[in-house]
Image (cartoon, rainbow, N blue to C red):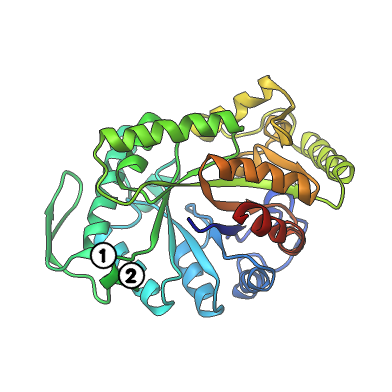
Amino acid sequence: MSLEFLWYIPNTVEAGHRGDPTTEGWGTLEFSTDQARTLEKHGWGGALIGTGWGRPDTFTVATALAAQTTTFKPLIAIRPGYWQPAHFASAAATLDHLTRGRVLINIVSGVDNLAAYGDGKADPAQRYDRTREFLHLVRRLWAEEDVTFNGVYFQVERSTVQPGPYGKEEGSHPTLFFGGASEAAQRVSAAEADVQLFWGEPLDGIAERIGKLQALSDSLERKHAPLQFGLRITTLVRDTTAEAWRDAEVKVARMAADAGEARINHSRRGAVGQQRLLDLAARGEVLDSCLYTTPGKFGGGGAATTWLVGSPDDVAAALKKYQDLGITYFVLSDTPYKREIVRVGDQLLPLLHETLAG
């Protein structure tokens, strides 16, 4: 199975995202285009583009970046409730058709300012049930014509998406990523996602979750190709192991001075996946070979809660162990974003292509 290496574009108008010291350009086409083209130049397949109310619209940004690049694949974060399934299916299929199959999609059901954009479905169980129905209908709209569907949350009558996704005749469609560690979230992935995206847990946690998802896929009689797996994590890479750990400790000390102990907002802390990451610090400051848990104690959230720290060889060896578990998509990042696109692209990616593909 082929491997994909992606980065992260923060998609915000506010400077300073995760400590990036760049002060100018955030939220402009030039700023994000420069990152996307730099990613192409330094060996990356594309990038996850974040979403959240009060930030630039992710699909609009992704469309603009796709038009400014030639190989860059946007992994577009979208939310059921913000989108209706037929509207989304049409927009994504159109962009996929225009870019000749470069569209990737990350479905998000977690917390956001739902009321601000008119989404009243706040109950978590209901959100995940709705997401599963959303994905089921989107898949049908991408594969079939004249679709009529009467679900609990969505209805369409004689709906056909034109143009269809690139390669529709061969059964192709934009790859659907989904995250979440709760029971409800895992059932969505097992039934309808193409890729389950994990945050940076240690190897035993990822292995346990992969096994559970594969068993769930069987119990739910999954109708699609086997579920694939991806890892979203911060990678702090330097020329030597000692230099990497010195810089990691400096960054964490700065986070501690700026934020104090555990400054993750209450709503995010309540997410099952986030809490799993925060609980890792109790097991040790460094897990496996080089998984650093301390950032989560001082404000690191999501993919910045745990970091893989080390030389290119150290981090490549750590990622190889994830690949051995079945991970085929790697979504990496560090700040300053542009500097690390180049550094990690030039120093780590060649090793990953050699080590993981070998």
Total labels: the figure holds: 2
Q: Which numbered disc covers residue 68?
A: none
Q: Amino acid at mark 2?
A: Ala
From the top left corner, tell me how far across and down residue 214 is, in percent.
Answer: 38, 36
Q: Quadrant of residue 137?
A: bottom left
- On screen, residue 139 versus residue 238, left or right, reads left
Q: Are marks 1 and 2 in contact (CB under 8 Å)?
A: yes
- On screen, residue 68 versus residue 290, left or right, reads left
Q: Secondary structure at mark 1?
A: helix
Can residue 194 be seen by looking at this rendering?
yes
From the top left corner, tell me how far across and down residue 276 is, in percent.
Answer: 55, 28
Residue 25 in the image: above or below residue 299 = below
Q: Name the foreground residue: 206 vs 277.
A: 206
Residue at screen point 44% across, 77% down: 99
Can residue 181 be seen by looking at this rendering?
no
Residue at screen point 71% across, 52% down: 334
The residue wearing badge 2 is: 93
From the top left corner, tell me how far across and down residue 189 is, in percent.
Answer: 36, 42
Q: Which numbered disc covers residue 142?
A: 1
From the top left corner, tell me how far across and down residue 130 is, in percent.
Answer: 27, 43
Disc 1 to disc 2, how far (Cα)?
7 Å
- On screen, residue 344 versus residue 8, left or right, reads right
Q: Name the foreground residue: 316 vs 285.
A: 316
Q: Residue furthest front?
A: 358
How many other residues sit within 10 Å of disc 1, few (<14), some (14-19) or many (≥20)? many
